[in-house]
Image (cartoon, helix red, strand yellow):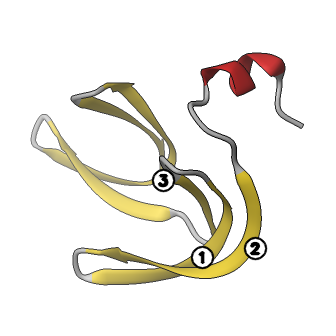
Amino acid sequence: MESEKVKERRDSARQEVDRRVDLVLPGRELTGRLRNRSREGMLVSLDEGLRVKVRLEGKEVRGTIVRVQAVDASEWALGIRLDD
């Protein structure tokens, strides 16, 4: 259930759906479920995480993206769970 605060931030109503959707990335395609949609966007769920490699100070680490958040109109923040 959505909080009233979240509902107030939304520009348009969400429509609950349950449909197959293909998410196309460079070099890869994932199948997921479309959970809801509105005029401005959609919520898609996947059965698997998005795996990434990160180069940090000359070292390469691997992990899974666990969260994506818009910071503002020109910047995105990614939460990455690192492998052991």
* Residue depth check, mark 1 versus mark 3: number of the one nearer the observer: 1
At mark 3, the secondary structure is loop
Numbered label attached to residue 83: 3
Q: Type of residue at label 3? A: Asp
Q: Type of residue at label 1? A: Gly
Q: Position of residue 1 (x, y in %)?
A: 89, 37
- Disc 1, disc 3: CB below 8 Å? no
Q: Upstream in the sequence, badge 1 or badge 3?
A: 1
Numbered label attached to residue 32: 1
Report, in whole angstroms, how far the alpha carbon at label 3 lies from the one at label 2.
31 Å
Quarter of the view holding residue 44:
bottom right
Q: Type of residue at label 2? A: Asp
Q: Nearer the viewer, residue 47 or 35?
A: 35
At mark 1, the secondary structure is strand
Residue 3 left/right relative to 22: right
Report, in whole angstroms, how far the alpha carbon at label 1 lies from the one at label 3.
23 Å
Q: Residue at x 48, y 47 (%)?
A: 40
Numbered label attached to residue 50: none
> Which residue lies under the disc numbered 2?
18
Question: On screen, 39 above or below 74?
Answer: below
Q: Upstream in the sequence, badge 1 or badge 2?
A: 2
* Residue depth check, mark 1 versus mark 2: number of the one nearer the observer: 2
Residue 37 left/right relative to 67: right
Q: Residue at x 47, y 80 (%)?
A: 30
Q: Nearer the viewer, residue 65 or 59?
A: 65
Report, in whole angstroms, how far the alpha carbon at label 1 lies from the one at label 2.
10 Å
Q: Position of residue 24 (x, y in %)?
A: 35, 77
| Residue at the outermost left position | 58
Q: Upstream in the sequence, badge 3 or badge 2?
A: 2
Q: Residue at x 55, y 79 (%)?
A: 21
* Residue depth check, mark 3 versus mark 2: number of the one nearer the observer: 2
Determine crowd level at label 3: few under 14, some 14-19, many 20+ residues with C-alpha closer than 10 A. Answer: few
